[in-house]
Amino acid sequence: MMNLTAQTPAPTTPAVIGLTSIEAEERLAELGPNTLPEPEPPSPLRVFLIQFRNPIIYILLLASALSFATGRIEDGLFILVVLLINASIGTYQEYSADRAAAALRKLEQPSARVIRDGVACRIEAKRLVVGDLVLLESGDRIPADLMLVDASDLRCDESLLTGESMPVAKGRTVEGSSDETASSMLLAGSLVTRGRAKGVVTATGTATMLGGIAAELGRASSSQPPLVARLAKFTNALAVFVGLAALVLVVAGFMRGLPLHDLVMMSVGLAVSAVPEGLPIAISVALAVSMRRMAARNVIVRSMPAVEALGSTTIIATDKTGTLTSNVQTVTEIRLPDGTDIALDAHADLDKCEIRASGLDSDLVRERARRLLRAALLANEGTLARRDDLWVAAGDTVDVALLAAGRKAGLGQEELNDRYPLAARIAYEPEHKYAASFHHGSDRIHVFVKGASEVLIEMSDRMDSAGNVVEIDRASLLAQKEEMAARGLRVLAFAEGEIGASLAGSLGHGHLVDLVLLGLAGLQDPVRPEVPNTMKDCHAAGVEVVMVTGDDPRTAAAIARDAGLSFHAGQVVSGHDIDEAARAGDQRLDEITREARIYARVQPTQKSAIVASLIRNGHIVAVTGDGVNDGPALKKAHVGVAMGLRGTEVAKESADLVVTDDNFASIVAGIAEGRAAYRNIRKVVLMSVATGAAEVLLFMLALPFGLPMPLLPVQLLWLNLVTNGIQDVALAGGRPEGDELAGPPRSPLEPVLDRTMIRRVVQSTVVIGGAAFLAFQWMIAHGYGVPEARNITLLIFVMFENVQTLACSSERRSIFSVDILRNRFLLLSVLAAQTIHISAMYVPWLSGTLGLSPITPLEWGLSMLIASSLVLVTEVDKFVSRRRRDRSSHA
């Protein structure tokens, strides 16, 4: 049984008008926040112990036990110390990543619209209390258990709680229902799929049904990113290979008569050192760092695999409203009846903009525009007011747009209402297509009307022309309206009139006669100013962009043209075209989506079909959306991108990413960060695999030539888990190089170890392993003792690691053209690795365990000279690769 804490609902009457802020704060203090219990994060101790759950660690522990058993106490202690250090680093990384993920989740707090102090406002859902009056509309996730007080055509998806797959009708009463209480209850966590409603909060937090379920089931753990899983398979395959190599070494060593303990320790140490066991951690660091950087660029990552997938995106299927455009209706043009055209700046500051008119009659033109906007402001049910240095709007988006245009003309709604006291109002209704208001004058009633242009043109019998009232020219006005609509504008008309004061008691639709048409206003949702340049960035990055919208083709094409999307008339298709192609089969639909760039009048099911077709055509698809109907397409895409400001909860929960500023440019910035993360992963793979393979080559060359073991097991562990580990993490968290959008995305079929990577791994392996072997052989041949030769060979390997780290700082650019200071952490990691190794030579216990001793400046310089040979090889390879790319690009 679920234990639901009882919460008593507020009395019905106060609830209908909402709570006051004081009442809400008192109840919040008494009942607590409207949040669900989150599972306790693992303690640092538990995270620390988890670091030892690894087969490689088991081998190391076995090696430590063998060391103690054979009297090699220092070796055994060193292995344990290295394991503790490695586990501590892993603990810090994982614990920090968990805390970072929690911090990112806080950026995505759900909200709710409520009535507080008699005013509709939006608050954090966690601050809801029993008795709050909540306003809901299609797409909202219900924030608490509610009792309905009003509903219009309401349907709710309760599948999360009840398993019912179909939306459930809701209302204060449902005809034919025997359970009136159930039908009028809205449950926290369910979704409003249709309609609007008002409801009183009856339970919050753990007292809701969802809270009871959450308390029992807890939260599911996140899945492992596919990239990490693929690399784990690669690591396991490499471990098998190294295990076989170690077996060969044991057999060869046994034939030479080497002690069994040395053979076992050498094989175990070689196997562990050659396998890049820290690679998954380094990759997680790369993805976590990119997640933080994306958050700084207004992209919240809900699913870690999306970091890599976004960087691999080949096509973006974007919606129009709120992504390419500002999602704010704006008056951009006023057309007076005689054809005089006045343009308004779509992105102007309301405090600084004014309507400017040119010509001999500019003052008259401005006055005529103000007369039109006076009608727009008085026949208006919205509000626009300044609060705390910000403009706060409420009401229909068109009403708010007209209020903003009036403000640009120097008109204020409050001042006009004071000058013209309201007598009556006709609210906008779809069947009428207009709204009107009646205002008291000195001896007359003033009438102001706004609405659909064809309706008001028919209602009016006169019009304003050059400041004079003349007989209306309906044909001319309709032609002007059609010309504006052809440019993607939404066109409204405005009119005014007067009636006798004696009719003030019976004002209504019948009094809207003998009107004077004042002109037309063109509204549009303007393209964000940064979008055209962002479109150019997409083109340069090889990322295609298509628009998917519910608008008609004419409006969609106009907006796409302003946004900088390149297309021709044949690339504009409609939802009807998609349906016909789908009925003809996938092949026909795929032919359309290979060419189309604008999809207009698209329904939700059609959007999903478009995404599926793009995927069949070989694309890595990112889809943007903000509505309930975008959920299926967001789920189907490789990367679902929800809009954070105006997006519904359905869209956000269906998506992998949430763009907090609803800006298309932020998506492209996220692509750059995703590509940078993948580059860093490749750098870590190259560094780890090449170093390990070079160690294997060193041992494989030493045994046939009858040389002693070149490096001790503890020295191998020191190389891979200490000096190399520091630099791996630095490469994983490296800063972007800045040219991530300068080329096409990688092929979806490209493996991590592609031909370029394999070639460079082989080159580095031969240079590092071969040079270390030649140096070791020369030292043995010229009278160096085995410990001294190992000491210098180990230093040479550390030097090679340092050079390899710097060479890996860019996969394509020369090491001499890279600004190393841009990635100070990388440079510091190289210095840290070198400093730690040299310092170990002077620490008695550590130097004895590792077989280290101080070296002369000459030996240090010669070691650096040997390691520098790797620079020559990598620079030649990069130069040849650049020349080859240049030739192919010019071909």
Image (tube, rainbow, N blue to C red):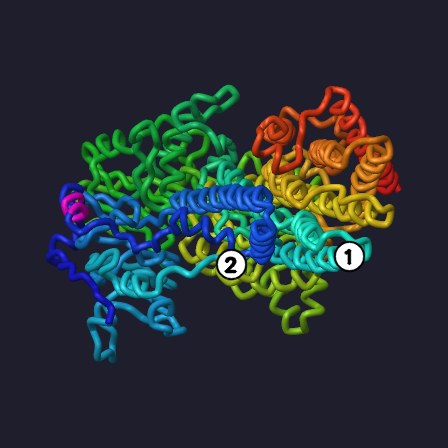
Q: Quadrant of residue 517?
A: top left
Q: Is the residue 578 above or below the residue 40 in the image? A: below
| Viewer-proximal residue among 58 and 485 | 58
Q: Residue at x 51, y 46 (%)?
A: 87
Q: Nearer the viewer, residue 499 or 675?
A: 675
Disc 1 or 2, which lies upstream in sequence?
2
Q: Dot 1: few (<14), some (14–19), or many (≥20) neighbours within 10 Å?
A: few
Residue span colored magenta? 25-29
Q: Is residue 28 highlighted in magenta?
A: yes
Read off the residue under disc 1.
254
Q: Say which quarter of the image contains residue 852.
A: top right
Report the quarter where the N terminus lies: bottom left
Q: Is residue 595 magenta?
A: no
Percent of width and height locating residue 820: 67, 26
Classify residue 226 by image quadrant.
Answer: bottom right
Residue bearing mark 2: 223
Please state the horizontal and vertical placement of residue 150, each as a whole percent of the image.
23, 61
Whether label 1 touches label 2, CB < 8 Å: no
Looking at the picture, tell me which residue is in the foreground, 681 or 367: 681
